[in-house]
Image (cartoon, grey):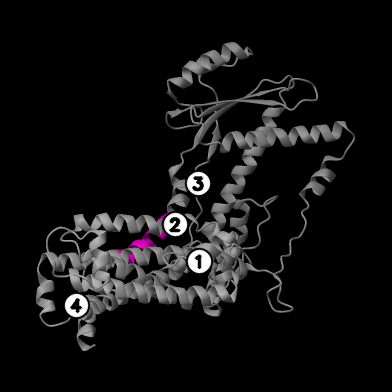
């Protein structure tokens, strides 16, 4: 026992000193940070201003102002959002932003109102560059009223992706799109938008123009039919109030809140962490074994300890490394959640918003549920299962190239929980989830995903007993393989030879 403990300590210290250990600790939170912030950054900084021309080819030419006013309103709301985000961290202590009134509020007026409540060094807000900017057509594309002739010139001009300098723009820019507004096929038909653009991936501009035309058409039709458009808009804007209740909650507390939604989907995040932890730690164990085997360090160790003590020490030492790494991941993710929300001023933007309540709801979820204990239990049992198999198979290999033949198969087996991770929370006690729960290699991941859905007690206890017995059986079988193969050289053992070693035959 003492020898196994000494080997475990040595294994733990050796792995925590490596660059791979610290890289592993930083990798998951870094990926989470990039996944959450890069799309926002690209949406704000990575998308240039789209310059477009608007042509009203209708008889009365009344749609031009309708579309332009709608786009200007959308741009004003975007500027207001950026201002509120900018102003929130610059308010004096104890001050919060008032609730937004998007119908009448502008960022310039709000900045004047907030002047006395801002910090001395707050500065002045600089609005972002507009997302879409209407410009006049170049001289070569002057509209002459002939649609066919105009679109012929337009096609050739835009196909070449030429640059020009519109009025009011300080540099040459490409023409992103040309929107031609046409009347419908009949007097009672909706207008037509002919949208020319070489970029068909960014559909925001055409969606907004279609929305403006559709709203205007519906309003005119309501008026033509003798209906009040404002009254209809008010009625259509009304929505039923949703109140969700969970009959499994205590009497008087049945209403579903954010904590319940987090509880429903948080296990999926833990499954990802569990998968990454088990796989990466098992790989760390394999690399350590192959390195010691190729450097003939194993022979030195086995001169002082038994193969079983060596195997036990390695399992315990690397398990401790995995526990430290996983705790670091969970802690860093919680801290990053607080940081990303509060640096963005989410609490001040909306005192009762989802973003403001999320950190405390997350802490409440982790503190009041048995999610963390379940994660620790399934991490340990899942790690022992896969680590023992990888350790036994690795003991039969002379180098990493040979070991990859085995680890590739194990990696494919471990992909099943990832494939089902999004489906199981939707039907946590259904036949697929139940069957997968009783397959020992998948039990830790599937049961972790079902933990928030109150699975039947027979499933919880039964799968746990099955997993423990499976771990015992796997450890026993793998210890026999490890003892027989650890000092063996030559070609990797065949499957038949592995079975012979498990049965105790040479």
Snapshot quadrant of residue 322? bottom left
Q: Residue at x 15, y 58 (%)?
A: 491
Q: Earlier in the sequence, mark 4 or mark 3?
A: 3
343 shown above or below 250: above
Q: What residue sits right under mark 1 in the picture?
A: 437
Quadrant position of the N terminus in the picture: bottom left
Disc 4 crowd rating (10 Å Cα; few below 14, some 14-19, many 20+) is: many
User: Could you say whether the residue bearing mark 1 is in a helix, strand or loop?
Assistant: helix
Residue 442 in picture, x, y percent from top left: 44, 64
Q: Answer yes or no: do the residues labelled 4 and 3 have beta carbons within 8 Å?
A: no
Where does label 3 land, which residue?
128
**Other residues around mark 2 within 10 Å, as few (<14) / some (14–19) / many (≥20):** some
Q: Is residue 299 visible?
A: yes
User: Disc 2 designates what residue?
Assistant: 416
Marks 4 and 3, how far apart at CA: 66 Å
Residue pictured at 26% horizontal, 79% vertical: 312
The CA span between labels 3 and 1 is 51 Å
Q: Residue at x 49, y 61 (%)?
A: 122
N-terminal label among 2 and 1: 2
Q: CA distance from mark 2 to mark 1?
A: 12 Å
Residue 124 percent across, percent down from the top left = 50, 55
Task: From the image, state whether disc 2 or disc 3 is nearer to you.
Answer: 2
Is 179 or 438 nearer to us in this picture?
438
Foreground mark, 4 or 2, reads 4
Give the Cα separation between the discs numbered 1 and 4.
Answer: 33 Å
Helix, strand or loop at label 4? It is helix
Q: Mark 4 or 2 closer to N-term?
A: 4
Q: Is residue 29 magenta?
A: yes
């Amino acid at each position: 026992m003492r020898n196994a403990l000494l080997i475990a300590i040595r294994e733990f210290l050796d792995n925590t000193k490596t660059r791979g250990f610290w890289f592993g600790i930083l990798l998951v939170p870094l990926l989470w940070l990039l996944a959450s912030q890069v799309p926002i950054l690209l949406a704000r900084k990575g998308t240039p201003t789209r310059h477009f021309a608007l042509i009203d080819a209708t008889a009365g030419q009344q749609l031009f102002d309708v579309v332009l006013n709608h786009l200007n309103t959308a741009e004003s709301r975007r500027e207001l959002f950026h201002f509120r985000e900018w102003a929130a961290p610059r308010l004096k202590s104890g001050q919060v932003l008032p609730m937004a009134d998007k119908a009448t509020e502008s960022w310039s007026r709000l900045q004047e109102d907030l002047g006395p409540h801002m910090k001395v060094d707050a500065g002045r807000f600089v609005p972002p560059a507009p997302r879409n900017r209407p410009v006049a057509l170049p001289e070569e594309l002057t509209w002459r009223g002939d649609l066919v002739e105009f679109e012929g010139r337009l096609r050739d001009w835009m196909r070449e992706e030429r640059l020009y300098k519109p009025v009011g723009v300080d540099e040459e820019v490409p023409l992103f799109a040309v929107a031609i507004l046409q009347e419908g096929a009949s007097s009672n038909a909706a207008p037509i938008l002919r949208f020319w653009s070489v970029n068909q991936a960014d559909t925001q501009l055409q969606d907004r123009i279609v929305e403006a035309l559709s709203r205007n058409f519906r309003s005119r039709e309501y008026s033509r039919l003798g209906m009040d458009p404002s009254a209809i808009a008010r009625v259509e804007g009304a929505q039923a109030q949703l109140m969700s209740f969970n009959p499994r909650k205590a009497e008087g507390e049945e209403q579903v809140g954010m904590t319940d939604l987090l509880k429903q989907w948080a296990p999926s995040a833990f499954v990802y962490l569990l998968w990454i932890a088990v796989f990466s730690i098992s790989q760390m164990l394999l690399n350590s074994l192959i390195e010691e085997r190729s450097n003939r360090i194993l022979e030195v160790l086995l001169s002082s300890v038994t193969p079983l003590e060596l195997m036990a020490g390695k399992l315990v030492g690397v398990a401790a490394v995995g526990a430290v790494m996983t705790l670091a991941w969970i802690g860093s993710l919680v801290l990053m959640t607080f940081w990303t929300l509060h640096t963005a001023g989410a609490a001040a933007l909306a005192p009762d918003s989802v973003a403001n309540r999320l950190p405390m709801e997350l802490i409440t979820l982790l503190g009041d549920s048995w999610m963390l204990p379940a994660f620790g239990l399934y991490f340990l049992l899942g790690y022992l299962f896969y680590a023992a198999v990888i350790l036994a198979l690795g003991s039969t290999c002379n180098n990493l190239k040979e070991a990859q033949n085995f680890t590739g198969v194990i990696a494919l087996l471990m992909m099943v929980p990832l494939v089902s991770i999004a489906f199981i929370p939707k039907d946590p006690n259904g036949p697929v989830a139940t069957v997968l729960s009783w397959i020992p290699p998948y039990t830790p991941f599937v049961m972790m995903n079902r933990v928030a859905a109150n699975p039947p007690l027979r499933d919880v206890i039964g799968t746990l007993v099955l997993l423990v017995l499976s771990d015992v059986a796997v450890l026993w079988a793998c210890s026999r393989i490890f003892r027989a193969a650890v000092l063996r050289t030559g070609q990797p053992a065949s499957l038949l030879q592995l079975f012979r070693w498990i049965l105790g035959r040479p």
